[in-house]
Image: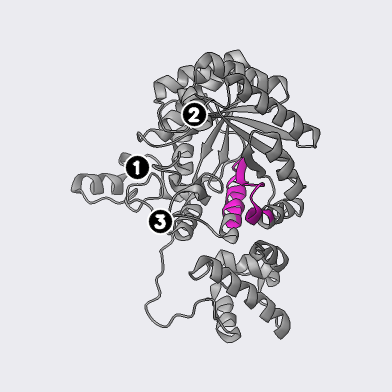
Amino acid sequence: MPKIYLVDVTNRDGVQTAHLGLSKIEKTLINIYLDEMGVFSSEFGFPTTQHERNYLQANLKMAQRGIIKNLVLSGWIRGIVDDVELAIKQVPEIKHLNLSMSTSDQMIDGKFKGNKTREDIINDMTEAVDAALACGIQSVGVNAEDASRTDIDFLVKYGKAAKAHGAARLRYCDTLGYDNPFSIYQTALTLAQQVEMPIEIHCHGDLGMAVGTSLAGAKGAIDGGQDAYINTTVNGIGERAGNADLVSVILAVTKSKDFGEKYQLAGNIKLDIAWKLAQFASYAFGVEIPINQPGVGRNCFAHASGIHADGVLKDPHNYELYSYEELGRGEPLLVETGREICTGQYSGISGFRYVVKTMSQKIPEDIRLPTNKEAANKILELVRYANVETHKPLTEDELKFICQYPDIAQQLLTNTP
């Protein structure tokens, strides 16, 4: 039976969100958490963008060294030969690319202003796929931007051309959140049956249905005999009204009525990473988690009504569909109200040693700050640079990461215009 693979696009679509962004170390921590969670792939950035180069190379180095163990790191580029060549020139180690082309008549007419036809779109895309595979790229995903407003016959033709040239899957982009669960199911079913290749579902929340349409699209692909790939972002952060939230998608697939019995997630998803990942993304983006966010919102396991409180105390299943322990919740959040020493752009070695010492009593020996003064100062300097990027105290996991992998941290923090 075909399965559902999760492709998280926080580090591509999420960071494109207006007024928001992540530092390169924050993007890297997101990848580490996604890997720990068992997510199949991270669309981890833009290999044609100069300031992404060191970050992308550093994360690929982490994969080579086994720090990132299973997460497939894929780059996003436009579906043109020039972008393929530039991506490989800037990040020679990259092995997975997603090529994007606009396919709707609205986009072809509105963006290209009569300079391209439908045939040009297919020709550009297939030439880019050929170029990528000729340069040693292991897998190429082909994206149809604004697919939900694209003529289905042309979309089938586009997908068949991608498959004929060796693409691994077709990404159906509901770019404006225009689809609903009923329309996307039929389209995904048609594509799976007629194109005969895995279908990737990319949905936005402009109409508030990103998670529902994602599930329905995946169902259509699987009913059509193909694997389904669902695009997600952490906490649903994405352009405009956001993307399908990662945790919500996992919960919907595994907990909704009758769905998970037939439509199963690929891999070993560790849902207990959800709380840690959601909290980190909230802090890094500077966006609070909505109080009613599925799984990780403050009120998900809060009960005030007498009937509900009585029922949940007798048996949690009375009023909770899943347990907070499944999501890695339950530990109290501690807020310092007395003296606090934290890291910053101007931290000194004494304060920094104190922070590292008090972070945790269970820090492995190889993560602790070196006793050698010169080596400790080098790590402190990296921490200072990291604070220059984030403008806020680093989390415990960020500090551990810099202490354990100073060479990678230095590469992530190196940005030469």
Tell me which label, 1 or 2, sits earlier in the chain: 2
Quickly name the residue at label 1: 320
Residue 40 in magenta? yes
Query: Height in image: 395 above or below 136?
Result: below
Quickly name the residue at label 2: 107
Circle 3 crowding by C-alpha within 10 Å: few under 14, some 14–19, many from 20:
few
167 left or right of 319 in image: right
The N terminus: image quadrant:
top right
Outermost residue on the left side: it is 306
Q: Which residues are magenta?
A: 28-53
Q: Residue 310 at x, y = what percent? A: 24, 47
| Mark whose residue sits in front, 1 or 2 | 2
Q: Residue 215 at x, y = what percent? A: 46, 29
Q: Nearer the viewer, residue 311 or 117?
A: 117
Quickly name the residue at label 3: 287
Tell me which label, 3 or 2, sits earlier in the chain: 2
25 left or right of 311 in image: right
Q: How many marks?
A: 3
Q: CA distance from mark 1 to mark 3?
A: 26 Å
Q: Which mark is residue 120?
A: none
Query: Height in image: 385 above or below 353?
Result: above
| Mark whose residue sits in front, 3 or 2 | 2
Circle 2 crowding by C-alpha within 10 Å: few under 14, some 14–19, many from 20:
some
Q: Amino acid at mark 3?
A: Val
The residue depicted at 46 percent of the width and 54 percent of the height is: 20
